[in-house]
Image: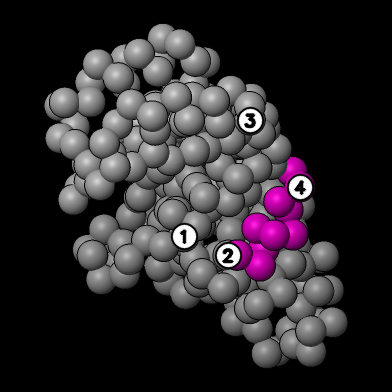
Amino acid sequence: MNVAVVTVGDELLAGRTTDTNATWLCSELDDRGVTVGRVTTVPDRVADIARVVNEYRAEYDAVIVTGGLGPTHDDLTMDGVAAALGREVEEHDAALAWLEEDGYTRDDLAAGTADLPAGARALHNDAGVAPGAALEGVYVLPGVPAEMKAMFESIADEFAGTPTYRETVVAGEAESALLDRIADVRERFDVSVGSYPGESVRIELTGTDEATVADAADWLRERVDSP
């Protein structure tokens, strides 16, 4: 399963808010064996949201969009997703019913709170108010991290791929000095290799067979200097 993640918000692009949602989602998806092919941040503009969602839903099995939900003037994500899918935005009866079960009345809710793309499946917000939506492989989640995490957990079973296994080997050598052994481990074992320098070099070995990954890591550890 291949997924794209889209985060929405002018505050993200201005650096006023750190985009922890994308990092958390990528980690959760990776744990489920799902490949994240794109992480993109777009401003609070309907045209930008629609263009990116429309492009990615043609390329990926699913698109997860976070941020910009609610009734305020800059909460435009539902409009952008609806435009990408050629849908109108309309009041969603199930979302309203959930909110009423949570103790809200129509008079309590700002206009537009329960507006979703026509035909969407409403996703209940157990940690907040604004509902999410799922439609045609596009999942729209809140931007507030606690709300986003709770809502993703309610749909997590819809994201599954081939389990991957990872081993890390730490080497106390310069990255350039390790090139021959990195090439050798890639040739000998069916694993992907990532090399990340710092005070020491962290070499990550990833594959779909747990035993192969473990054997590759053992082979490499015997051939590098410990930090």
Specify the amino acid type for callout 1.
Answer: Asn
Indicate whether residue 8 is drawn in magenta. Answer: no
CB atoms of marks 2 and 1 within 8 Å:
yes
- Residue at image point 44% right, 24% down: 219
Q: CA–CA distance between discs 3 and 2?
A: 31 Å
Q: Depth check: give the residue in front, 216 or 152.
A: 216
Q: CA–CA distance between discs 2 and 4?
A: 15 Å
CB atoms of marks 3 and 2 within 8 Å:
no
Q: Earlier in the sequence, mark 3 or mark 4?
A: 4
Q: Which region of the structure is painted magenta?
A: 149-158
Q: Is residue 122 above or below residue 48?
A: below
Please identify, in this view, whether the residue under mark 1 or under mark 3 is nearer the observer: 3
Quarter of the view holding residue 210: top right
Residue 104 lies, in percent from the top left, at 75, 87
Specify the amino acid type for callout 4.
Answer: Asp
Q: What colour-coding does the image apply?
A: one colour
